[in-house]
Amino acid sequence: MTSRDRAFRGATAVVGIANTPFHKRGTATQSSAQLTLEAILAAAADAGIDAHDIDGFVSYANDDNEGLAIGAALGAKEIRWSTMVWGGGGGGVAAAVNAASAAVASGQADMVCVYRGISEADAGRQSYSKGHMGPLLSGHGVFAPAQICALRTQRMLEVDGVPASAMKALVQAAYHHAQNNPDAVAYGRPLDPAVYDDARWISEPLRLYDCSRENDAAGAVLVTTAERARELRQKPAYVLSGVQGAGPDWSESVENDLAYTSAGFHPAMVARLWEGAGVKPGEVDVVQVYENFSGPAVASLIDFGFVPKGPDAGRVMQFENLIAPHGSLPVNTAGGNIAEGFVHGFGLIVEAVRQIRGTSPNQVPDAALSLLLGGPMAPSVGATLFGSDAVL
Amino acid sequence: MTAKEFPGVPADLAEVVERHGHAVAAGDNATVLADFRPDRVGQLLASARPPEGMHSAELLDVEPGPDGLFSAFIRYTGTGGEAVFRSRWIQLDGTWLVTQVRNVPDTPPRTSMAHPSDDGLDAPHWEGLRRGELRMQHCPRCDRWTWSPRPICPGCHATDLEWPVVDPVGRIYSWTRTWQPFSPEVTGHLPYVVVVVELPGAGNRRILGVLLDGDGADVRIGAEVKGEIEPAADPEGYPLLRWRLV
Ligand SMILES: [Zn+2]
């Protein structure tokens, strides 16, 4: 039985979305719980529902705030679903949406909130890598995801032959899109290509602008049944298909992952996403691709077949192709982690939904299929494909 | 002040470098920071480690290169010993600025994380290093090498796994040269190169470590490397497996 037969497709929809402002790291006066509640209340207002009616909570990336505590703070009438997606970092961003949809589609809960909040005041620095850098890495001076992603990106460039220009094009597109997004951290700060080229090394082959940087902020989205979604005030962004997890010989293996230069979206996972949605890659209108770092984002687009492997990747990964409204593969249309703001990719969920609603700062005309890719080169990865009622 | 002369080095740079060394030794932070490239002050400040109680500086050499930069070597002396910094200078808008700095000679970082993991799964590896051996997890039943170590064999689910000695010889599978001070423990060792090494002696499993003298090295994937076990800093600590280009 395929996942499509199991009626996941179109059974649920995102009906409320919100980000708090993206505060510079370490500057928010609120705790991560306060930021999270601010985002959830804003998402409820966006959906036009009473936040007391939220009956499920899902988060990821080892969020500091348990669903039950958030539900209690909201005075939830009943909590029916509470899930943390395992796997550190942004690998869980799409998986969290999928988990919420699974809960709603199966009748375990009716209005599930996906949330994530970071405040350096209580989470500390580098909340993304906690618990994932054991002695076989950190004993050798490898402390940060940037170094892991640098190792994998280096082989993608040196052995696979993907040109470094592919990474630059992705970053330039993100900064370009951020110029139309007043909420983006890079709004009003366009990136001069020469500044990108000349920026300091973080860990070769990644320079400063190839890297995302954490913000103090939170995001929340609300998932409910397709039926209920049609009664609410916003245009529903239906969940057509979702996949998550790790392929063979992938995950927590200290650089022994089998498909080393892949982002982790193995062929069976990719096929399941398309099959579940009844969609072909060429039909997707717009992609939000998680860029912890530019290299893994390029690898994600290769894994999904949007971009050819090897040197040919440079043909598609060109600035003109990657920008809305008329590029052939518009990506990260609000600026992404790199230029909009970093809360483990939460802004990418919100933007994927805005594209379906028609409210993106860089709207792709009549976008009906909007793809979210989370967590590249992390122990767990995932994807969610959203669609408008036009594709149901 | 009469600046020393160095072949192939602009006289004004030699003067700037001499003054810079004295400013560093004197703790004249305003002058020092003004000498740093403004977009990388934080990284530069945390890259090199000065001696304790630093009080004087001696300019040893300035030479052209590499990549159009100029390299200056300054010895700083303090109550706790001495350290030589190699700063690299670039001219931007007519001003000489430091764009890289490191301690020389190039020594690998040693971190407080060099010990068995909390779950103890990798303890035989670390104990092996104490006896001068590289040991990795292997399943005698299905002949599978597993790395990183697991509680059971993922191939056949055997629980009685062994830790044979592996010849520390292999090829670079990938590498990165890290410039960012992700931990205060690496200050004084930046930049350093970490390699992932594919080991034919362990079913082509890969192990990770620092490449010795990696700073200026022409590192390539596929290059042959040989492991060396660096003794622990103290009896309580553990040795580390380092790599060297063959
Ligand atoms: Zn076995």
Image: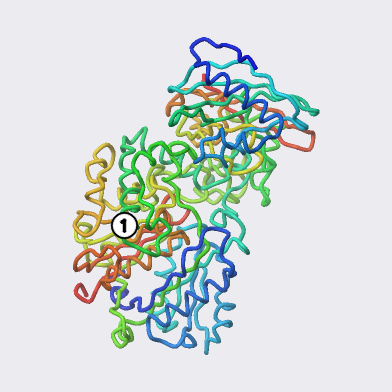
Work out whether residue B100 or residue A310 is closer to the camera in this orientation and state it: B100
Decide if residue A72 is in sight here: yes
Q: How many marks?
A: 1
Quarter of the figure with residue B20: top right
Chain of the residue on which disc 1 is drawn = A
Q: Quadrant of the N terminus of chain A?
A: bottom left
Q: Is the shortest distance between ligand 1 and the CB of mark 1 under 8 Å?
A: no
Name the outermost residue toward the bottom. A77
Point out the residue furthest to the front here.
Answer: B1
Give residue A97's position: percent from left, percent from top. 40, 69
Seen in the image, is A260 located left or right of residue B156?
Answer: left
Q: Position of residue B190 (x, y in %)?
A: 58, 33
Give the residue drawn at x 22%, y 50%. Answer: A321
Asked whether, in this view, residue B220 is left or right of residue A279, the answer is: right
Tell me the amino acid under the disc marked 1: His
Q: Measuring 28% from the left and 76% from the top, which residue is drawn there?
A: A10
Name the element at disc 1.
Answer: helix
Q: Quadrant of the C terminus of chain A?
A: bottom left
Residue A1 can be seen, yes or no: no
The residue that disc 1 covers is: A177
**With respect to residue A230, does A10 lie above or below?**
above
* Residue nearest the viewer, comparing A23 with B149: A23
Viewer-proximal residue among B204 and A73: A73
Left or right: where A367 falls relative to A197:
left
* Vertical relation: A248 (above or below) A96: above
